[in-house]
Image (spheres, grey):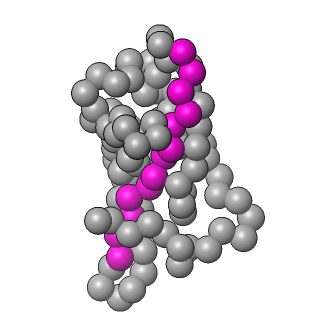
Amino acid sequence: MISQTTYTVNTTNGPIELTITPINARLSNGDFYKTGVYRLANGVVGMGEIVFNENMDEWNYEGMDELTWEEAAEVARFIKNYKDPAGADPDELNEAE
């Protein structure tokens, strides 16, 4: 995932539109790489992070119970299966703060 995207998840409190922002970093040679960390927000309200291992086959939800495990699993599946749009520019990766 090169830049942020949105995803609507049905929660126990009704549907919410999450903004998913990948946290990427820059190597010393100038290349970007994916850290596996995806910040979640509902508007301006932080909803925690989903953190994948380097193979994207295991994940953890790090939040203050804003999402249930099942809701976080749905978002993690979306992130794992997400395909960047055609023409997405790797130079526009969001750099880690």
Q: Is residue 4 visible?
A: yes
Residue at image position (54%, 63%) is 2
Residue 92 is situated, as x and y percent measured from the top left of the image, at 53, 73
Our reading of the magenta stretch's main secondary structure is strand
- In the image, residue 92 sits, relative to residue 8, either above or below, namely below
- In the image, residue 32 sits, relative to residue 39, either above or below, namely below
Residue 72 is situated, as x and y percent measured from the top left of the image, at 43, 27
Name the quadrant of the C terminus: bottom left
Residue 69 is situated, as x and y percent measured from the top left of the image, at 38, 20
Q: Residue furthest right?
A: 86
Which region of the structure is painted magenta?
A: 14-26
Q: Residue furthest front?
A: 44
Residue 36 is situated, as x and y percent measured from the top left of the image, at 38, 52
Residue 44 lies in the magenta-colored region: no
Residue at image position (28%, 32%) is 63
* Of the pair 80 and 63, the residue shown nearer to us: 63
